[in-house]
Amino acid sequence: MAKLKTALILATMAVAVAGCQKKRPETLPPGPGAVDPGTAPGTGDNMGAAQPGTAAHFKQNIVSDTVLFGLDQYDIDADARRILDSQAQWLTQFPNTRITVEGHADERGTREYNLALGDRRANAAKNYLAARGVSAGRITTISYGKERPIALGSDEASWAQNRRAVTIVLN
């Protein structure tokens, strides 16, 4: 009888939590990529161009602001190096720009474990950028663990998107 009560309580909690999850929007915004500011409709003479040194300019001129990691990993692989090299190149052009590197994890694991893993991911990206000539004093890190997922599914494709470090330009 006690096992039945426990099972009913757990099932009720699972249904309650599942009902509270955010729904994925039907249409997603376009992914990061190069933007030609001169072709934006109604912009005239580069009125749509991002101001150099801004967050928008950063996103327009780098490969990506996001580095992805494997399960329980925080090492910088070849794809991450390509992304971080483009970020380092942009950051050396704007030496007064400060950034924050956010570390994230997927939903698996405890809150504490994922916060520590997110911290290791953010610091791995920070250390790589510093090794490429970006002053470490310009870079802060923060870990959100599993608290800010970008993909809301409970499958490998969603988890892979959530295992990341994101570079944010502070204006």
Image (spheres, helix red, strand yellow):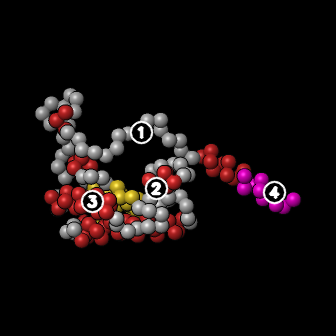
Label 4, secondary structure: give it: helix
Between the residue at mark 4 and the residue at mark 3, the CA separation in whole angstroms equals 53 Å
Task: Judge depth for marks 1 and 4 and give the one in front.
Answer: 1
Residue drawn at x 24%, y 47% is: 60
The C terminus sits in image quarter? bottom left
Q: Which residue is mark 3?
A: 82
Query: In the current view of this chain or complex, which residue is farthest to the right?
Result: 1
Assess whether mark 3 and mark 1 are in contact (beta carbons under 8 angstroms): no
Answer left or right for 110 relative to 144.
right
Assess whether mark 4 and mark 1 are in contact (beta carbons under 8 angstroms): no
Task: State the extent of the magenta-drawn residues as a range.
Answer: 1-11
Residue 28 — which label? 1
The N terminus sits in image quarter? bottom right
Give the vertical position of 127 relative to 90 (above or below): below
Between the residue at mark 1 and the residue at mark 4, the CA separation in whole angstroms equals 42 Å
Question: Residue 123 occupies which quadrant of the picture?
Answer: bottom left
Q: Which residue is mark 4?
A: 5
Which callout, 1 or 4, points at the residue further toward the start of the chain? 4
Between the residue at mark 4 and the residue at mark 2, the CA separation in whole angstroms equals 36 Å
Q: Which residue is mark 2?
A: 160
Q: Name the amino acid, label 2.
A: Ala
**153 or 166: which is nearer to us?**
153
Task: Judge depth for marks 4 and 2 and give the one in front.
Answer: 2
Task: Judge depth for marks 4 and 3 and give the one in front.
Answer: 3
Which callout, 4 or 2, points at the residue further toward the start of the chain? 4
Image location (x, y in percent) of residue 71: 48, 63
Label 2, secondary structure: give it: helix
